[in-house]
Image (tube, rainbow, N blue to C red):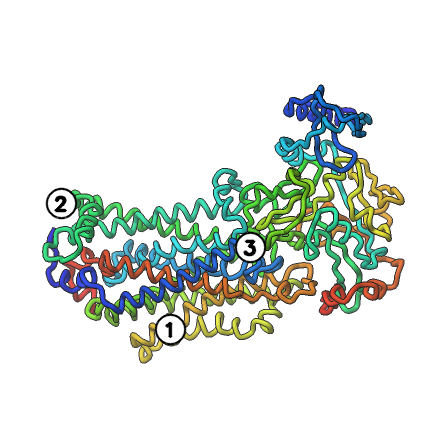
Amino acid sequence: MKGRNNSDKSSRRKFLRKLGTGIGVVSLTGVPGASVIAGSKTESGEKIKLLSPEGRLVEVDRENIRPARETTDYIKEEARKGLHGRKFVMVIDLAKCRNARKCVEACQEGHMLPKDHEWIKLYLLQDDRNTAPYWLPRPCFHCDKPMCVSVCPVGATYKRDDGIVLVDNQRCIGCKFCMTGCPYSARVFNWKDPEVNLPPGQAYDPETNIPPVEGTVGKCVFCADKLRRRELPRCVTACPMGVIYFGDLLEDSITNGEETVRFSKIMDERAGYRYREELGTLPSVYYLPPFQRLFPFERGLEDVDEETRLRYRDAGPR
Amino acid sequence: MQADRKLLYDLTPELTRTSTRWYITFFIFFAFFAFGIYALILQIDKGHIVTGMRDNVVWGFYIVNFIFFMGLSYSGALISGVLHLFHTAWRKPVIRLAELITVISLVIGPFFIFFCIGRLDRLYFLFIYPRIQSPITWDVIAISTDLVGCFIYLYLSFVEDFAILRDFDELNVAPWKKKLYRILSLGYSGTPRQRKLLSNARTIMSAMIIAIAIIVYSVLAWIFGVTLQPGWHSTIFGPYFVIAAVFSGTGLLIILMWIFRKIYHLEEYITKRHFVNVGVLLTIIAAFYGYFTFSDYLTKWYGSIKMDSILIDKLFNQYYSLFIFANYIGILLPGIIIAIPKFRTIPNITIAAIIALLALWVNRYIIVIPTLETPFLPVQDPRPDWIKYTPTWVEWALTMAGVSIFAMLFMLVSKIAPVISISEMQGKDQNEIMK
């Protein structure tokens, strides 16, 4: 643990040196990166509280804050490495899901996705007419043997040390081979200009995939930006049912924001499995079967709007 | 270099004069081509939303055209390469056509994969950030090698002809053409040493382009085969695609033989014998191709892994007529027409070739599209165009543009060099070649 923190710090120091400006800070207010010019002559007197890389709260004069545009390279470099000494996993409890779609909404909002882009998708599945139907939330599985990464001709999509698979949409050429390679349809394509309004000068961050770029591929990023800030992914916190658990396999602990459980224990007790294990892609997302579900299955269809209902018109035993 | 007078008088008129009909035809093709360019500009401007491709069917007409055009390039490898290696005499009047098909379709093919790419401005990333794990990188290497190889092979077959045209004083062509022949003939004058070098080079290249062509088309098949998608994840795809490619190349060769024979009045040189021989080749290839198709679908149907049976079910319902046309009519009918001696007339063989060619295109379509419409997780979407792929006019326009540029390039080349190789034809026993 200690080693991890050290390397974290040293890489951040590198970043500061790169900037050559003095103190680097990560804003509390949500500005993704900012630099502070030390010893600036004019001071407004208005102080802003910021969190230093070491986790200390510091006060800085507003006049001294500059948007850190130069940090793109740093962000991209760090986003390729990932968080050292981590192996993220997600566990989805199918017994609790009732198609509330809050995960979808939070994801779309957090990643500035247009309404028709769903990085996490809700499927209505029924394996056979004699078996029970169930709702299946499907994020990207962040496979340990990711087909999308193998087939990418330019290294735009990559696997990090912490298990997360990301897309660099400044590298992506839009050949869509990863989309045919992914057996889980986890990837979406920007078929047209995404038209998102960004604060001017915001640097591209592969950990959020913001801003999206026309003609490139996007997908669930496991909220890598939030993980860097030691926060839970958006879909986990948004789910009203606590369906989605997230955690670190190496720590053997996962949480849905309300309860924290041992990964190995819940896998054992609830007979956790991975979707289509036989494909050999080794997903990082596990499912708990819809055993003794909390709601009758019908609860998923009545609260949704007409368009959502329309998408399940052909759903049935397969 | 002097050549047989009769040959020169018969084969060179198209180089010296150009009919109004030629110009009109060329203009029509050009109009189609220009319309395709307009569609392409629109697609680049508005994004791929103007095509029928969506998140499930991410590859549509373009990839079908890509593998189709790449397949046509087999005509040169087989007819020209194989027959050259075996010293088959009757090949001589048709090899130039076969080699031209190869190079021209190889030039056009890759453009269709470019249309499929979301960010054309980053195309050079393929070279500056290449990853050898990706079958697309294999493709980049294989296709560029093939293009160079086939171009060299084509050029080697042209050198002697350029020398003959350079030395043919009565040839009444524009001075720039004469100059072109002088430059391109590389000072070839037919000395025994030059002859030997050229002949050796052509033999080596004919063997090489066969190998390269097999690699290129296998790599192309592996783009599909290496994925886990139902219908694509098949070990048979490499050889299956190779044989399908030879099938289409041979089919197109017959069609072009018919067109040029008719329009350039080459009845004396391209005879029924050539149609029958190439037709028989087509039938033999059709048998192999049908066999591969059958074993691919039989194993999928009989073993019936769930995803495979969903796919087969879709092919036999939603795609029923296309499936029947591509895999029954398109394979059996050409075979029957050519196999029965009574039906073996030049128009019949040409019709058989047209059916074969169209059916093969449809076969590519029903390999690519239904699989993409049948992902492991069912497509659950309120938008109909996300569920079912329908090509838009943009994709049709670019497809037509591809066909047009193919025709235009052929028409242009036929004005610079004869479509029948003069050097191959001369000094040979004409009976052996033509009868």
Q: Residue B191's mark?
A: 2
Q: Tell me the quarter of the picture where residue B69 sits.
A: bottom left
Q: What residue is shown with label 1?
A: B352
Tag 1, which secondary structure? helix
**Which one is nearer the viewer's eye here, B99 or B295?**
B99
Q: Is residue B427 above or below residue B262?
A: above
Q: Tell me the quarter of the picture where residue A259 sits.
A: top right
Q: What's the residue type where badge 1 is placed? A: Ala
Q: Using the rendered image of the protein, determine whether residue B92 is visible from the camera's viewpoint.
A: no
What's the residue at 29%, 52% (across, down)? B154
Which residue, as the protein is rendered here, is positioned at the far bottom?
Answer: B342
Q: Is residue B328 above or below residue B78?
A: below
Tag 3, which secondary structure? loop
Disc 2 crowd rating (10 Å Cα; few below 14, some 14-19, many 20+) is few
Q: What residue is shown with label 3?
A: B47
Q: What's the residue type where badge 2 is placed? A: Thr
Q: Chain of mark 3?
A: B
Q: What's the residue type where badge 3 is placed? A: Gly
Q: Is residue B338 above or below residue A11?
A: below
**Earlier-in-chain disc, 3 versus 2:** 3
Q: Chain of mark 1?
A: B
CA distance for labels 1 and 2: 44 Å
Q: Using the rendered image of the protein, determine whether residue B159 is visible from the camera's viewpoint.
A: yes
What's the residue at 55%, 56% (across, down)? B48
**Rendered-image quadrant of the C terminus of chain B:** bottom left
CA distance for labels 1 and 3: 39 Å
**Earlier-in-chain disc, 1 versus 3:** 3
